[in-house]
Image: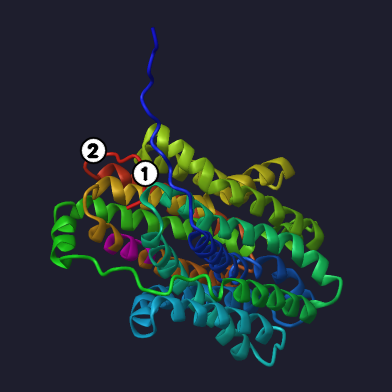
Amino acid sequence: MTIQSDPVPDVPALSSAAWYATISGLSGSLVAIGLARFAYTPLIPSLIEQHWFSASEAVTLGAANFAGYLVGALVGRPLAAGLSNRNALRLLMALATVAFFACGFPLSASWFFVWRFLSGLAGGSIMVLVATSILPHIPAARRGFVSGMIFLGLGLGIAASGTLIPELMTLGLRQTWMGLGVVSLILTAISWFGWPASNPPAPVAASHAAHAEARAPRSLGVVYGQYAANALGLVPAMILLVDYVARGLNRGPGTGAVFWVIYGIAAIAGPVLNGYMADRIGFRAAYRMALVLQGLAALLLGLSGNTYAIVAATIILGIFTPGIVPLVLGRIHEILPHGPAAQRQAWSRATTAFALFQAIGGYGYSFLFSYSKENYALIFLLGATALALAFAADFLAPKRARAVPSISG
């Protein structure tokens, strides 16, 4: 007697074009977010010590990237509509590359601000465009894998900045910016012909998206608010972690860079770990857990100078810096399980909310940092407070939300 098992559905292999597009997406997120945003953090102590900028100026210039990110999130889709997704992504990658080289010449704080702003603009636009440009050309059964590969670029960029910066700094601060520009130029060249040549098809019946959103306004509003508050919770570590270890705790730039490497390694694992957790307990429960852990990590940074406590906080915040992206995207898909167009519209709004409060947090914290005479604990504790509010807000949303098996819409 023969026992027959159910056939295992075939998972389609990715074509060479799909693989190339995936590598391009990873390169885009690595350059325009992983490096353009996060490589600045381990450079802050050196920018101050070598008298390029004062401490308050260095932190404020870091926030310029957040302001650019907000503008980029808003103009990304119009830019792609005018140029095509492929040409827009090429232009944005080139812009991020030029910004690295330009930052090697601190002609003035205004000059530096403009280029940090433009690098942020490139990052925000790429964040909005990269997945929606690639995923429609990927078989549905492989979109989860490709999404993970694209988000992986964030963690790789953080880890790369933490390992590259100390090596490049042995050559000098200007040479460090030049080196980052060369890496970005290489990745831009690699990705140049990998972007899909055609734009994804426009969503059918946009009114259906508006109707789907109208049926869940409270749940979506809570998600937007949580994601915005989450930005306020993450910004302190993004801009001050290395400086806190190097100058605040008097451990030096080398030790600060080590912590940034730890942060980056954790960031590489973040999307995978969060996806694994969400598959088992649902996106809403997983995001609640993420908010609690982030809040505790921010508290540790604010209240303790113990090395082990700071390592633990660094790992947790590193995991969730890129890891919250698939959690929030999955949460939106739970709320709008059958509306792909509504999902894309809601994700765009969530990204804009995050970008707005990231920029507000960047400038607000930089002002408070200067006004409080470099009180690191105050900034970290404010971040913890924002995360606590985000967690509390989740209980305002309707309890019932349908779960979906993946976020591949």
Question: Which residue occupies the foreground of this view, 125 or 297?
Answer: 125
Horizontal relation, residue 23 to residue 73: left or right: right
- List x then y, in percent, for residue 339: 22, 54
- List x then y, in percent, for residue 361: 48, 67
Measured in 3D between alpha carbons, the distance from the residue under mark 1 to the one under mark 2, in whole angstroms, is 20 Å
Amino acid type shown at disc 1: Ser
For the N terminus, give its image quadrant. top left
Q: Compared to 1, does 371 lie above or below? A: below
Q: In terms of secondary structure, what is the magenta stretch mainly?
A: helix
The residue at 35%/44% (across/down) is 392
Which residue is at the far right? Answer: 170
Q: Residues within 10 Å of mark 2 (few under 14, many from 20)?
A: few
Which residue is at the far bottom? Answer: 107
Question: Which residue occupies the foreground of this view, 58 or 11?
Answer: 11
The residue at 19%/65% (across/down) is 204
Secondary structure under badge 1?
A: loop
Secondary structure under badge 2?
A: loop
Q: Earlier in the sequence, mark 1 or mark 2?
A: 2
Horizontal relation, residue 105 to residue 342: left or right: right
The residue at 32%/58% (across/down) is 224
Q: Does the stretch in magenta take in 231?
A: no
Which residue was labeled with disc 1? 406
Horizontal relation, residue 146 to residue 189: left or right: left
Q: Magenta part of the protein: which range? A: 345-351
The residue at 19%/57% (across/down) is 213
- List x then y, in percent, for residue 153: 57, 60
Which residue was labeled with disc 2? 399
**Picture quadrant of residue 207:** bottom left
- List x then y, in percent, for residue 397: 25, 45
Amino acid type shown at disc 2: Lys
Q: Is residue 50 visible?
A: no
**Picture quadrant of residue 199:** bottom left
